Image (cartoon, grey):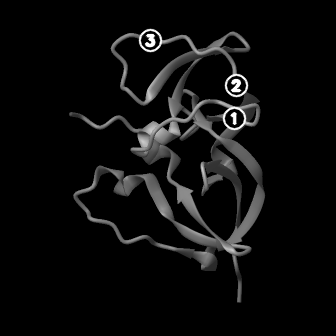
């Protein structure tokens, strides 16, 4: 049997764990000052200057309908690119834990109410060690829905 393994960064929001496919990740940086941008979506906290590039930064907590907690010394900004042509964006998480290798056979689809706009935010759930990890769909999270 040929099994396929994917690598994910395990990130946390409070007690919840999320997996982000490493193919989307450009870098993981410590928190830095964020410049607010007027009239942006409420989950976008603003922009940062990263090596001369202006990068929009999103609160993953706010995007998922949760409250953004205060930043701590372990809070991180994960710089992701949904595809090769797309501009990078930052996603704020409470903590980055580790890199996990998860086999495709361990990934189970989640059942959602199809009318929930957040249905496109997850690629499923995987069991990793003794925990369940929600595997994030980075292109779905970064996509702007028309109001």
**Disc 2: CA contacts within 10 A as few (<14), some (14-19) or many (>=20):** some
Image quarter of residue 4: bottom right
Image quarter of residue 54: top right
Residue displayed at 70% across by 32% down: 72
Residue 39 in sight in this render: yes
Q: Which numbered circle lies on residue 114? A: none
Question: In the image shown, does 114 or 60 lie closer to the viewer?
Answer: 60
Q: Which residue is mark 3?
A: 37
Which residue in the rendered view is the most extreme toward the bottom? 1
Q: Quadrant of the N terminus?
A: bottom right
Residue 113 at x, y = what percent? 27, 65
SS state under label 1: loop
Residue displayed at 56% across by 59% down: 135
For marks 2 and 1, the one nearer the N-term is: 2
Q: CA distance from mark 2 to mark 1?
A: 6 Å
Residue 81 at x, y = what percent? 59, 36
SS state under label 3: loop
Instruction: Look at the picture and state if 2 lies above or below 73.
Output: below
In the image: residue 125, left or right of residue 118: right
Q: Nearer the viewer, mark 2 or mark 3?
A: 2
Instruction: Look at the picture and state if 123 lies above or below 76.
Output: below
SS state under label 2: loop
For marks 3 and 1, the one nearer the N-term is: 3
Q: CA distance from mark 3 to mark 1?
A: 21 Å
Image quarter of residue 70: top right
For marks 2 and 3, the one nearer the N-term is: 2
Q: Quadrant of the C terminus?
A: top left
Residue 85 at x, y = what percent? 54, 32
Q: Which residue is mark 2?
A: 31
Q: Are marks 2 and 1 in contact (CB under 8 Å)?
A: yes
Q: Which residue is mark 1?
A: 75
């Amino acid at each position: 049997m040929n099994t396929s393994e994917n690598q994910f960064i395990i990130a946390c929001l409070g007690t919840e764990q999320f997996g982000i496919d490493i193919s989307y990740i450009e870098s993981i940086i410590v928190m830095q000052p964020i410049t607010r941008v007027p009239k942006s979506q409420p989950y976008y906290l603003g922009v940062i200057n990263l090596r001369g590039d202006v990068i929009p930064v999103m609160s993953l907590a706010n995007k998922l309908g949760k409250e953004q907690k205060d930043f701590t010394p372990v809070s991180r900004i994960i710089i992701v690119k949904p595809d090769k042509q797309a501009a990078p964006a930052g996603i704020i998480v409470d903590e980055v834990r580790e890199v996990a290798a998860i086999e495709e056979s361990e990934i189970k689809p989640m059942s959602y109410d199809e009318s929930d706009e957040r249905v496109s935010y997850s690629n499923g759930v995987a069991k990793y060690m003794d925990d369940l990890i929600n595997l994030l769909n980075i292109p779905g999270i970064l996509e702007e829905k028309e109001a």
